[in-house]
C-alpha cells in the first residue's frame, strides 16, 4: 500500500477499523486498491463493511462495484453530499 493510499484510508479515523477492513478485502484479492479504499474509508468498529462485502459476494449476483456501494459505511454517502463538512 502506498503512503498516499494509507493516508486517505486513515484520514479522520478514530480506530484501526479502516485498515483492518482494507486488509481483509485485499487478502481475498477481490477488489482493486481504489475499490477497497472506497469500501473501507470511514469504517468504524461498530460497522463491518468487509464482512458485508464478503458475505454479499457469495450470496448475490451484484458485481463488485455494486457491492462496494451497498456495504460502505453510511457516513461515506453523507460526506459525498456535504464534502466540506457540516
Image (cartoon, helix red, strand yellow):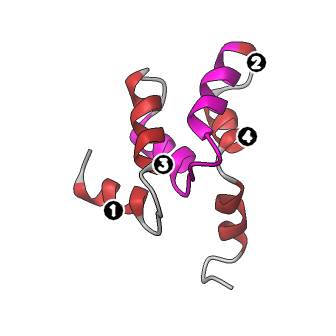
Asked where in the image residue 63 lies, by quadrant, the reply is top right
Separation (CA) of disc 1 from disc 3: 14 Å
Q: Position of residue 74 (x, y in %)?
A: 72, 56
Q: Do residues under tags 1 and 4 come within 8 Å of each other at their CB atoms?
A: no
Bin the neighbour count of mark 1 within 10 Å (Cα to Cα): few under 14, some 14-19, many 20 and up: few
Asked where in the image residue 60 lies, by quadrant, the reply is top right
The residues colored magenta run 32-58
Q: Quadrant of the N terminus?
A: top left
Q: Which residue is mark 3?
A: 17
**Position of residue 1 in the picture relative to residue 53 (left or right):** left
Q: Do residues under tags 1 and 3 come within 8 Å of each other at their CB atoms?
A: no
Residue positioned 52% across, 47% down in the render: 40
Bin the neighbour count of mark 4 within 10 Å (Cα to Cα): few under 14, some 14-19, many 20 and up: some
Q: Do residues under tags 2 and 1 come within 8 Å of each other at their CB atoms?
A: no
Q: Which residue is mark 2?
A: 60
User: Which of the labelled discs sits on residue 70, or is there none?
Assistant: 4
Q: Quadrant of the C terminus?
A: bottom right
Q: Do residues under tags 2 and 4 come within 8 Å of each other at their CB atoms?
A: no
Residue positioned 60% across, 24% down in the render: 54
Where 51 sits versus 78, above or below? Answer: above
Where 13 sits versus 26, above or below? Answer: below
Q: Main secondary structure of the magenta part?
A: helix
Bin the neighbour count of mark 3 within 10 Å (Cα to Cα): few under 14, some 14-19, many 20 and up: many
Separation (CA) of disc 4 from disc 3: 18 Å
Residue 40 within the magenta-colored segment of the rendering: yes
Q: Which residue is mark 1?
A: 7
Amino acid at each position: 500500500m502506498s503512503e498516499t493510499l494509507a493516508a486517505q484510508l486513515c484520514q479522520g479515523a478514530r480506530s484501526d477499523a479502516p485498515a483492518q477492513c482494507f486488509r481483509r478485502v485485499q487478502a481475498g484479492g477481490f477488489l482493486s486498491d481504489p475499490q477497497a479504499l472506497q469500501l473501507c474509508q470511514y469504517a468504524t468498529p461498530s460497522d463491518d463493511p468487509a464482512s458485508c462485502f464478503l458475505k454479499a459476494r457469495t450470496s448475490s449476483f451484484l458485481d463488485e462495484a455494486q457491492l462496494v456501494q451497498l456495504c460502505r459505511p453510511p457516513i461515506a454517502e453523507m460526506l459525498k453530499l456535504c464534502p466540506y463538512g457540516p
